[in-house]
Amino acid sequence: MEQVFDDAFFMKKALSEAQVALEKGEVPVGVVVVAKNTIIARAHNLTEALTDVTAHAEMQAITAAANSIGGKYLQGCTMYVTLEPCSMCAGALYWSQISRLVFAAEDPKRGYRQQGTLLHPKTEVAAGVLAPEASALLHAFFKQKRD
Amino acid sequence: MEQVFDDAFFMKKALSEAQVALEKGEVPVGVVVVAKNTIIARAHNLTEALTDVTAHAEMQAITAAANSIGGKYLQGCTMYVTLEPCSMCAGALYWSQISRLVFAAEDPKRGYRQQGTLLHPKTEVAAGVLAPEASALLHAFFKQKRD
């Protein structure tokens, strides 16, 4: 059967990363960065493990993707992330000049759109891809925290 | 002679970090993070050396300060930075809940205030401390680039 490399395909990979974060007791957010239908970086949130507020999945993935490419700009790359990026991560994406951002669940409280932070004008955005699956992981995490 | 630990004293330390960046061919921005009149983190911009847009001085200093403290929140800390932070760094400072931010030169183009990015409501801000000295380093860098 031929593999279809569509947005849902790559978002599932990002969801797998988020699942790993959940199992580690981290807020479950996962990322993959894709260039020419190839995953060049994967990451999940590690703020608790690293005791570092900057260790969001997106930040790690930007660093890893630049390392993979051998250049600091991510033109031609797409980031798939399971939650709408915060201002920090959107600011980093701005500097990276990434070509495309695809996110799953919206973050009405801390998302970059709510905060008014701008992406690079050349970055295309698609929202809501597999949002229910991403939200389910986040709800599982916060329920686990409460119980 | 008694040493006065005022904002100018610590901003001079941040300017020394910016000077190191300049000598390495990096955009000259330097940071120190201070807790109880002690410098717990120093950093300068390393985006070129690390080929990483996330390697702003502030991001490195937040990670280093959290490491020094052994906790991810920078309550009780002050960051001295020679240039107004961008949205990425302001977003990171937001998550850190840092108590005070002191910056030297304004950045009317990429500064967080222009972009509308919010700091944490508990973060006090002081702007303009040794701004001429910080601007002189930035001008020296861009002149060097043009020549």
Image (spheres, coloured by chain):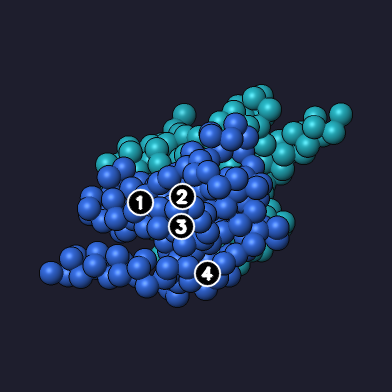
Chain colours: A blue, B cyan
- Marks 2 and 4 sit apart, C-alpha to C-alpha, by 15 Å
Q: Residue at x 52, y 54 (%)?
A: A5
The nearer-to-camera label among 2 and 3 is: 3
Residue at the far left: name it: A147
Q: Chain of mark 1?
A: A
Vertical comparison of B100 with B27: above or below: below
Residue type highlighted by circle 4: Ala
**Chain bearing mark 3:** A
Q: Residue at x 49, y 52 (%)?
A: A2
- Residue to which mark 1 is pinned: A17
The x and y percentages for residue A71 are 62, 35
Q: Residue A69: percent from the left, percent from the top?
A: 59, 35
Could you tell me which chain the residue with mark 2 belongs to?
Answer: A
Q: How far across and down, in percent of the image, does residue B60 sit?
A: 47, 39
Q: Nearer the viewer, residue A131 or B29?
A: A131
Q: Do the numbered discs 1 and 2 sit on residues whose CB atoms are within 8 Å?
A: yes
Who comes first in sequence, dot 4 or dot 3?
3
